[in-house]
Amino acid sequence: MSDYIIGIDQSTQGTKAMLFNEKGKIVCRADRPHKQYIDEKGWVEHDGNEIWDNTLAIVKELLTNSQVPEENILGVGISNQRETSIAWDKKTGLPVYHAVVWQCTRGEAICQRLNKDGFGEKVQEKTGLPLSPYYSAAKLAWIIENVPEAKELAEKDELACGTMDSYLLYRLTGGASFKTDYSNASRTQMLNIHSLTWDEEIIKAFGIPRSALPELTDSDGYFGETTFDGLLKKPIPVHAMLGDSHAALYGHGCFEKGMAKVTYGTGSSVMMNVGPEDLRNDQGLVTSVAFKVNGRVSYCLEGNINYSAAIVTWLKDDVGLLSSAAESEDWARKANPADHTYLVPAFTGLGAPYYRADVSAAFVGMNRNTGRAELIRAGLDAIVYQITDIVKLCQTAMGVPHIELRADGGASGNAWLMQRQADILQDTVRVSSEGELSAMGAAMCAGRALKAFPEKEEESFESYMPKMDVKEAEERYEGWKKAVSLLL
């Protein structure tokens, strides 16, 4: 019988557990959604206890349904929603407050305060990230400033702060291991990406104790051992942790400079491997650590979009234009080609390359004939245009005329959307046949670290070539930029 690795993907909408064989194929999976807490301010939270309970439940289901002997399961790889931040009691492992989700902008005032003090430029130079409430530091600072228990524990060096990977690891190991990897750390706005250490000046400015931050470890490092709270008779190692976008980059095999991917998830991350040297740019992109594996660091350029497939969820759940996400493809095909309605999906502000938390969403360019199909198509188009913004900036930063984009994520299964992306980009889009690149990337990374999986595995794609006339593609994209400019 083959050897297997458990891949856990703790994502924005839910948590997934999958069992992968050495070819990177899923042989069994289990999923659990978790509640989205959104208040009248648009602040977004998750219940860390619910996520922990769900993790154990899906692993139990995975072990039961797969019928794979325990001795054939060699280890665990974890991918996670990035920037989402949580604080917990080191003694009990219990959260002191809900996790503050990456979409949440509640740390805006903290960032404004630091920016007023002239700290913004220093933060970007050291971390590769613009000073923004999008990243973890401002979220954790908000918790410490506004949750009395967090402040009390921080003063006693009994508070733990981190992204969801370090929280799950802490609970999986019964508090024995408090670690994170460089990819996740680089998204907190507290990692000095040049020295690959927590930056003392920055964490002090945010008011976050050094004792509250996890130990830094390579993405394929040894993170500790777990029995999943007794579900396994013997502990197995957690031997990979990566932010979900970084894990997808790894899963796509984007190990070389210039290789890029986009994940069509709740939000979207466009990420390009730029090699072993951090590439600074003034194009509205950010520089992060792609991953550190086999002792070698790879950096990446990236742009993040707050609302991608979440637009379809909004059209379905809140506006009532869709009864299922899958319907969006048929409705888009029915839309009037002459309609030029745009949706600027700034429900919680705009991410890259605009970084405007104060902008509100709007439909732009409607006329009396704009109807259901046109509004739905505008929603899908908004995903395409936002990704095009970032890909074009990557091309400029790298000085290349074309970038072949590798795609994954739930919405990449929408054939109309993928063709539209190729048309507007006027470039090839290659969609992975594997639907779970984040979990797969983490599992393959762990399997290779354990010398159980091959170093490289060929990935299969479906390719979309541009069919739209170049002039029409340019006109539609220019219309998008004008729509955005009206709101800025």
Image (cartoon, grey):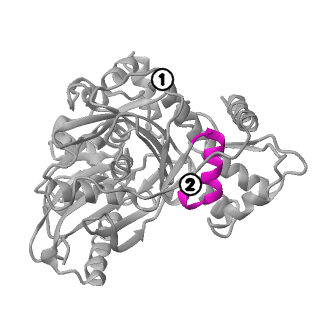
Foreground mark, 2 or 1, reads: 1
Q: Left or right: where does residue 363 sit relative to residue 456?
A: right
Q: Name which of mark 2 and mark 1 comes first in the sequence.
A: 2
Look at mark 2 in the image and give the residue it sits on.
309
| SS label for mark 2 | loop
Q: CA distance from mark 2 to mark 1?
A: 30 Å
Residue 212 visible in the shown view: yes
Q: Magenta region: which residues? A: 411-427
Q: Are marks 2 and 1 in contact (CB under 8 Å)?
A: no
- Does 345 lie within the magenta span? no
Q: Where does the image place residue 482, in percent across and percent down from the top left?
A: 72, 30
Residue 48 in sight:
no
What amino acid type is highlighted by mark number 1? Answer: Gly
Image quadrant occupied by the N terminus:
bottom left
Kind of residue at disc 2: Ala
- Which residue: 20% across, 41% down? 213
Residue 422 belongs to the span the image colors magenta: yes
User: Which residue is disc 1 drawn over?
Assistant: 399
**Image spot of residue 346 (x, y percent):** 61, 41
Residue ranking furthest to the top = 118
**SS label for mark 1:** loop
Q: To which quarter of the image does residue 373 belong?
A: bottom right
Residue sitting nearer the eye, 17 or 466: 466
Q: Which class describes the residues within 10 Å of circle 1: few (<14), some (14-19), or many (20+)?
A: few
Q: Image point 27% across, 46% down: which residue?
A: 162
Residue sitting nearer the eye, 330 or 137? 330
